[in-house]
Image (cartoon, rainbow, N blue to C red):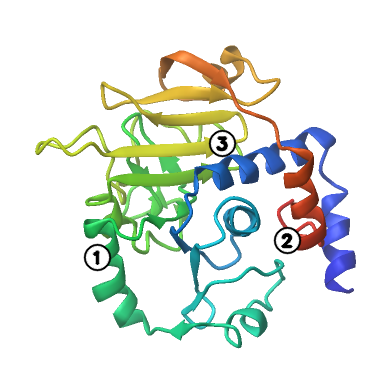
Amino acid sequence: MTHAIATRAADLRLTDRERDQANQIVVTMARLIEDGDFLAEGIGTFLPTAAYMLAKHTHAPHCISLCPNGNTLMAGTRALTLGHDEFETIPHASMWLDYLQINTSYMPAIFIGGRPRWTEFMRPAQIDPTGATNNVCIGPHARPTVRFPGSAGIPDASTVARRFYYYAPRHTRQLFVPKLDFCSGAGHPGDAHGQPQSVTVITNLGVLTSGPTGHLQVTHLHPGVTRAQVEEHTGFALDWAPDLAVTASPSVDELRWLDAAIDPRGLRF
């Protein structure tokens, strides 16, 4: 079975509403990216990578991507592939880095120094009211019922980053929990030295950001989503922004970029 047939077959299992939600997540993430950002990709993370490419095609053409396949820095754009990214990223890279350089030089300098802005959207297994996260296990650490791949650089980055982004394709009570089974990512209720820190979570229902109390508050509902739906699918009481807004829907041009140039195989679905 070819990649195109396989991905289109998977695509057919989604409802129109689920497809719209996936596009909304991608576009909402892309709009948070600023021109010149340093964009960190994960392996097989199609929603964030689609958002990075969309931002580069539209309002942020000077962003640099850190691509995990080959640890390459790439200035341009590419289409999403199913396991063939290195054929695009390695030949067109402006620089190759080893893992030691990334973790001991580039990441600390950018997270602490803030220039250029490090932007990465990561997907946690659990999130608590302060935006702290778990990507290690469900159940007791010694005898977990579910074991995840691990937290990677989240423990390092989340303790010093001024702004931290997560995404969640499914907004559920299993994700938003009152207490983590294991804490592997710091929440950001504020900083003792007066430096504001915040967590932003993009889900299929809306946008949540660290509020004045340090707890997550809903700032945007996606089109067609109600406050009652968000509350029903969250395992703790949320704060609500006084100027709660409706997220702007994807534009015709944004959808055209996604379908024609960035993700014609529909991997984001």
Q: Position of residue 149 (x, y in %)?
A: 45, 63
Q: Earlier in the sequence, mark 1 or mark 3?
A: 1
Spatial CA distance of label 1 from label 3 is 28 Å
Give the residue drawn at x 57%, y 54%: 48
Which secondary structure lies at badge 1?
Answer: helix
Q: Which mark is residue 108?
A: 1
Looking at the rendering, in which quadrant would you find the N terminus?
Answer: bottom right
Q: Is residue 9 left or right of residue 103?
A: right
Give the class, few, some or many, for how many residues have Cα within 10 Å of label 2's Cα (few <14, many ≥20): many
- According to the picture, the residue beneath numbered tag 3 turns out to be 203
Circle 1: residue type: Pro
Q: Amino acid at mark 3?
A: Thr
Q: Residue at x 71, y 71 (%)?
A: 82
The residue that appears at 46% across and 79% down in the rendered structure is 71
Whole-angstrom CA distance, mark 2 to mark 3, is: 21 Å
| Residue 164 image offset from top left, x and y in percent | 37, 46
Q: Residues within 10 Å of mark 3 (few under 14, many from 20)?
A: many
- Marks 2 and 1, the one that precedes in the sequence: 1
From this viewpoint, is residue 139 visible?
no
84 w.r.t. 182: above or below: below
Q: Quadrant of residue 10?
A: bottom right
Q: Amino acid at mark 2?
A: Ile
- Residue to which mark 2 is pinned: 262
Q: Are marks 1 and 3 in contact (CB under 8 Å)?
A: no
Query: Residue 23 location in percent, x, y?
Result: 71, 43
Q: Is residue 173 above or below residue 139?
A: above
